Image (tube, rainbow, N blue to C red):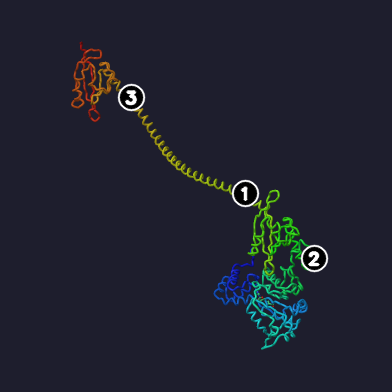
Amino acid sequence: MKNPEIDPEFETLLDYIKNHRGFDFTGYKRPSLMRRVRIRMQIAEMETYGDYTDYLEVHPEEFFHLFNTILINVSSFFRDRSVWEYVQTEIVPQIVARKDLPRDRIRVWSAGCASGQEAYTLAMVIAEVLGIEEFHQKVKIYSTNIDEAALNQARQATYSVKEVEGIPEPLLEKYFKQTNGNYTFCQNLRRSVIFGRHDLLKDPPISRIDLLSCRNTLMYFNAETQARIISGFHFALNNNSFLLLGKAELLLSNSNSFAPVDLKRRIFTKLHRDTRKEYFLGSSYGKERENNYPLNNNLLRDAAFDISPIVQIVVDIKGLLILANEQARLLFNLNTQDMNRPLQEVEVSYRPIELRSHIDQVINTHRPIYLTNISWPIANGDLYYFDVQFTPLYDPSKNLVGVSIGFTEVSRYKKLQEEIEHANQELEMAYEELQSTNEELETTNEELQSSNEELETTNEELQSTNEELETMNEELQSSNEELQSINSELRLRSEELNQANGFLEAIFNSLQGGVAVLSRDCIIQIWNEKNEELWGLRSEEVLGQHFMNLDIGLPVEQLRQPIRSCVAGEVGVVEMSVAAVNRRGRTIQCKITCTSLVGKFAESRGVIILTEEVDSVES
Ligand SMILES: C[S@@+](CC[C@H](N)C(=O)[O-])C[C@H]1O[C@@H](n2cnc3c(N)ncnc32)[C@H](O)[C@@H]1O
């Protein structure tokens, strides 16, 4: 889920500050931090965090004002007075009592000391218990802050009347010298208070501290950063020494490391973490219970470790097998004698995987190693699979103290993974087939489309041909109709002609003489029955014959000249008498009349030869 507090532009601004000025504000709580930045943005008249980042780039002097605004140096002497009364009456005496004075020194740390009020308050409170002389010899108060300007003010140890208002009158008189209307802390004690720049987020904690006061500072950091700083404080403090927090601050995430001494006043004591290797495989549970000390959380943690479903062993920096939880003991067949033995002497060192080299790697690189799917054959021939995680283990001062090795059994997941892989392969194959089928379909589709287009073209051609045919058909039909009408007309004409012919024939046949009609070139056109009778040749035999070629009893040669004259139009009619032999062989005298056949426009079309038998001549 998106964190509503995270504004990417604002985070960019924080990164910019971190990279350019070494101030890391990323661990600070966003709402108050953003409010502080916006104060400066208003003064600089910048609308967005982006604009303000650009502004910082151009105006580096702005960093000074920005840090002054972000680092809130609100402080006062004897702030929350009851706390200091308690420290003076309850805490400092305990510290003094534990110390082997004058050999031991009392070391105090005021972290986030602002302009020194808290450090000098501590000095007065302790001096009240020890006395000024002893304080001077035995006490060191380290006062640190990230803000150099505030530290400089603190080093001056000079405060206004208003600023010293919180100091009880006797103490003010006792520990301060008044100069020019201000109050300066007494030089003797001042020398035991050492001021220095220290960033709680970056710098290593000061060590061997008996009393640590970090008041109203943690509350500016987010929970994760607070936890980190408190871890540092745990390291900084001697066992059973004390931590003072501001009244709004609590130790929620580090409740295992500190126990409240006076919760209301926010005074805590450091719990020393026992070497946890005793807590199992041995009998330390019992001892812990007897102590009935607020270490119950440790017991719970150890019990939780022991029954954890993840197989886990811990090897210390010397390579000794220190811890093995219940699952590890069962799986690797470990027993009490295996504990504190060099790992290489125990079978787990090389089964299911060679551990030493990986442990060495973790120790050398300080980096965790994660190995997956480590197989381990079991009796029935099956394989167990493990993910193995090697994690470096550190003490609070960040020294590497050992390596934790966790074995997570993943046989089920491995099997599932294999099944999934198999299914995936099948799926891939099916997909490929589908793909190729698809491609085929696509090709076929395209082919079909092209065939369709071709068919469409052919269809169009056919249609146009069809239309042409249709037109032709209609034309033919109309021609046919015309032909039919012509035909019937022809038939009519033909009948008329036949009638006319019949009539003509009748006329020609009814004539007493033989009639032959010749064309201009003497081809016989008409040959009537009388001629047939006379000359013994039927009309079918002579029609189309040249008249001069007729081999009949008529001396056609004698007719040549008259026929020519008639055809030439030289004469209209020529009459002559010729002797001829009829078909019976009888000689007959014939009167021949050649008449010119004249057309409608007086043109010569041939000749009509009329043959009349005049007398029979006896041969
Ligand atoms: C409100 S003052 C508390 C002063 C004093 N402890 C008190 O309770 O009166 C908070 C101080 O924390 C300091 N501070 C902020 N961030 C810091 C950091 N990362 N490291 C050290 N000090 C820091 C500020 O400079 C400021 O002086």
Measured as percent of width and height from the top left, residue 368 is found at: 65, 62
Q: Earlier in the sequence, mark 1 or mark 3?
A: 1
276 to 124, vertically: above or below: above
Query: Which residue is at 75% across, 82% downward?
Result: 130
Instruction: Tell me: 541 left or right of 235.
Output: left
Looking at the rendered structure, the number of numbered marks drawn on it comes to: 3
Query: Which residue is at 19% across, 22% downward?
Result: 560
Measured as percent of width and height from the top left, residue 106 is found at: 73, 78
Numbered disc 3: secondary structure: helix
Judging by the rendered image, the residue that carries numbered circle 3 is: 498
Q: Amino acid at mark 1?
A: His
Q: Earlier in the sequence, mark 1 or mark 2?
A: 2
- Quadrant of the drawing holding the N terminus: bottom right
Judging by the rendered image, the residue that carries numbered circle 1 is: 422
Q: Which mark is residue 440?
A: none
Categorize mark 2 by other alpha carbons within 10 Å: few (<14), some (14-19), many (20+).
few
555 to 138, vertically: above or below: above
Judging by the rendered image, the residue that carries numbered circle 2 is: 287
Determine the image quadrant of residue 268: bottom right
- Quadrant of the drawing holding the C terminus: top left
Q: Amino acid at mark 3?
A: Asn
